[in-house]
Amino acid sequence: MIHAVRGVHDILPAEAAKWARIEATARRVFEAYGYEEIRLPIFERTELFARGIGEATDIVQKEMYTFEDRAGESVTLRPEATASLLRAYIEHGFHVHRLKPVKLYTMGPMFRYERPQAGRYRQFHQLNAEALREEHAALDAEVIAMLIEFFRELDLGSRVALQINTLGDAKCRPLYRERLTEYLRAHAAGLCPECRERTDRNPLRVLDCKNPACRSVLDQAPSIHDSLCFECAQHFLDVRQYLEAMGIASEVNPRLVRGLDYYVRTTFELTTTELGAQNAVAGGGRYDGLIERLGGPPDPGIGFAIGVERVALLLADMREDDWEHRRPVAFLIPIGDEALKRLLAVARAVRTTLPIELGYGNRKLRSELERAHKMRIPWAVIVGETELAAGSAVLRDMEAGQQQQVPFPELARRLMELGGRS
Ligand code: AMP
């Protein structure tokens, strides 16, 4: 027997209904904020991610699914969507012929070779939204508002909390990086081996360490907020004021650095206390400079990614009533091949507007009725030799057990009436 690959999951029907609702909610909310959908390939040239996400990140160093195709070109299954989206933005000249800001959203699978555990997988799914060509702090606040609105629409608003931070920009961050590296080197003895290794490669990432042993060193580390240049400090203040104007509560977390190298200024994350170690359900930030690094114009950008599996986990205890909309109005039970032919045609007509179930005449009437009962289908239609001879079907009310005759020419219309769609 062949099993699915480790860290990769099937989304079974009950779960898929929930996913459809999550995706429909994203579409509705994002489109209300003026975002348009873009669909992107799931693999790209490896170089795109190396340049886009950053050579020093864990993702690029350890987690990418990279392989050579048959022509010897190195390609990679996308570990995130932003780099692909920006590649498409540049390639299709969105920066030339689109009004600004350009607002795009996309959804689909991402691939990272991580250690699988609850809420962390090797193939997972994200909902992404990106707003390009505008650097106003009000856009940052609006993007965050849209993210919150998505969770509110799913009735999860009270179960997630917003954290925000700023990482400075190319002007002030290098200085902070230096101060931080100096501090971490001086306190290396109190850090875990991974933090020590990261100190030179990616010092900001050390702040993110979840190891409790490192906490006391990291709690005393210099804060980015003491190193910001005037513009970055003002931008952060503005973002917070615009959030406040919309009544959105947030907590400033100076250690929120996120795992991707490209962020500047605003970063944010939505966390929950309900999913154990994998507590981030969504994250994002501003990435001015990234479009240029990928060979495009110096356009600014900001965006976020929502982890669909984690949203689905939060929705796990919700009553699943989606089946109600898909519940068949009737179960058609033919007895014999002639009856089957007649009911195939009836089913086809009704299915233009309503779900309906059909037996194939290869089971006993009693077991077919039991099946209808188990599926809680309200009506059954029975056609055997007697009904064919009489020119009418038996329509059975499954709850009351009462039966009536319906002439064949009226049957499809009658079923549509019973389903409320005539
Ligand atoms: P990132 O692209 O790393 O900023 O992640 C954005 C969101 O995607 C996170 O907040 C998670 O909800 C989700 N996510 C990231 N990595 C994984 C993973 N390996 N498995 C499941 N969800 C993930």
Image: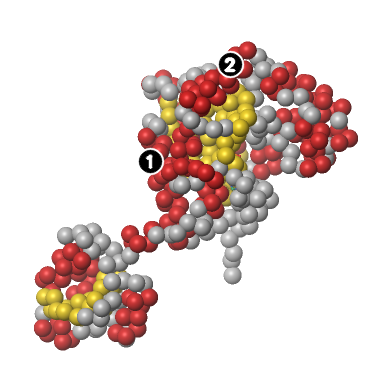
- Residue 144 in the image: state x and y as whole percent: 50, 32
Amino acid type assigned to the residue bearing label 1 in the image = Arg
Q: Earlier in the sequence, mark 1 or mark 2?
A: 1
Amino acid type assigned to the residue bearing label 2 in the image = Gln
Determine the residue positioned at 41% across, 21% down.
Answer: 100
Q: Say few, some or many: other residues with alpha carbon within 10 Å of mark 2 (under 14 / 14 to 19 / 20 or more).
A: few
- Residue 268 in the image: state x and y as whole percent: 58, 32
Determine the residue positioned at 19% across, 80% down.
Answer: 403
Front residue of 90/126: it is 126
In this image, 403 relative to 149: left or right? left
Pick the quarter of the image with the C terminus.
bottom left
Say if disc 2 is inside 8 Å of ligand 1: no
Asked if 376 appears above or below 384 in the picture, the reply is above
Determine the residue positioned at 68% across, 35% down.
Answer: 57
In this image, 159 relative to 182: left or right? left
- Secondary structure at badge 1 equals helix
Asked if 337 appears above or below 263 in the picture, the reply is below
Q: Say few, some or many: other residues with alpha carbon within 10 Å of mark 1 (under 14 / 14 to 19 / 20 or more).
A: few
Pick the quarter of the image with the N terminus.
bottom right
Determine the residue positioned at 39% across, 46% down.
Answer: 24
Q: Tell me the residue that label 2 is attached to.
A: 234
- Viewer-side label of 1, 2: 2
- Residue 76 in the image: state x and y as whole percent: 59, 41
- Residue 197 in the image: state x and y as whole percent: 81, 35
User: For residue 28, which numbered disc appears in the image?
Assistant: 1
Q: Residue furthest top?
A: 230
Judge whether residue 52 can be spotted in this image: no
Front residue of 353/89: it is 353
